[in-house]
Image (spheres, rainbow, N blue to C red):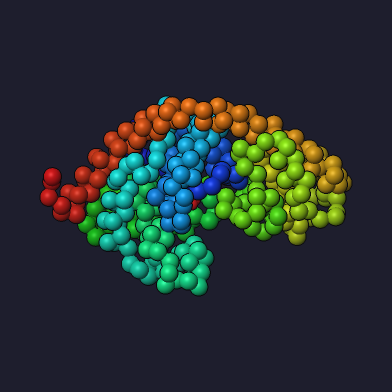
Amino acid sequence: MTKDDDMNRIFSGIQPSGHLTLGNYLGAIKNWGALQNTHECLFCIVDLHAMTVPQDPQALRQATREVAASFIAAGINPQKSALFVQSHVSGHSELAWILGCFTPLGWLNRMTQFKDKAGKNREHACLGLYAYPVLMAADVLLYKATHVPVGEDQKQHLELARDIAGAFNRHFGVDYFPLPEPLIQGPAPRVMSLRDGTKKMSKSDPSDFSRIHLLDDADSIVLKIRKAKTDPEPLPAEIKDLEHRPEARNLVTIYGALAHKSPQDVLKEFAGASFSIFKPALTEIIVSVLGPIRTETLKLLQDPLMIDACLKEGKERACGLSEKNLSEVHKLVGFLAA
Ligand code: TRP
């Protein structure tokens, strides 16, 4: 596919809440780096989404730069792709308002993420948390993105973005917004918590031992893998025998993703090995992949002005598209030209 091809535009976003994890790297960032060779890509640090839960302003600022630095260190080329901050392009909020006027409450009430996050305390949950999926739809539709790499947990939100795009198009009798498709890429493994193999590895889990951060040094990685939950059995020869061993399966999956091997091939190599053999091998490969990314990220963070300059360039590119599309939307809905 060629660049500047409106038929093929990728948008994805990541929240600057907390430090990025190995899960973010293997599940998203690593693949994004590959996509930019074949597609026009926009990668957005979604700070407006992050503030749907309380954030410390200083920490938010730091996390935003840190995410940008880690992206660049992990292979996102800001010359190729637009790497930018959501709040820098006001079109996101503006389109979210407009799209919100085409989103029935019934659709939002179905969103499982809202139900999980609001819990029993629904009356106290903020409007932002409820409207979160509308903002996400706006992120994607603002650029008329056609493909969105998302994890399993965001599929329902992307489905909603398609529904909202369809509702808008039907209302005005146009074929304006493309219906964005989820992009399921090759082996993008779901990396689970190191403490509980049935839960996703998450930036926001209270336990630091549940995850590996992209900025963890070798000593912390050694410790976290040593402490990672397992079971007393040695590794089996067949992947199906890991079905009821979520923690073991997770570690095998992580090893495979880092070694560019299928989990089955990892078992070929380690069948019969105990965790006292497998864990050091796993630690070694994690350190060998994350070490250089960490070094590069820390180097970039020494020069925050350079990071800000990259983000400004990304903002300008994003604004070019966003302004054009928003003015078309204004026309469609009947706003008077300014
Ligand atoms: N909601 C996504 C997440 O938490 C982040 C996100 C915001 C996003 N806007 C997006 C992802 C647009 C893809 C496309 O993971």
* Camera sees residue 42: no
173 vs 200, nearest the viewer: 200
Q: Image check: 135 left or right of 246?
A: left
Q: How many marks?
A: 0
Residue 336 in view? yes
Residue 162, image quadrant: bottom left
* Quadrant assignment for the N terminus: top left
Q: Position of residue 291 (x, y in %)?
A: 65, 31
Q: In front: 103, or 9? A: 103
Horizontally, residue 205 falls left or right of residue 277, namely left
Q: Which residue is rendered at x = 59% and y = 52% of the image?
A: 202
Q: In the picture provided, is 227 more to the left or to the right than 141? A: right
Residue appearing at x 61%, y 39% in the figure: 214
Q: Quadrant of the C terminus?
A: top left
234 w.r.t. 323: above or below: below
Q: Residue 239: where, in percent of width, then height?
A: 76, 51
Identify which residue is drawn at 38% across, 44% down.
86
Q: Residue at x 86, y 47 (%)?
A: 274
Residue 330: horizontal and vertical position, in percent? Answer: 20, 49
Q: Nearer the viewer, residue 285 or 162?
A: 285
Residue 176 position in % (x across, y down) = 27, 49
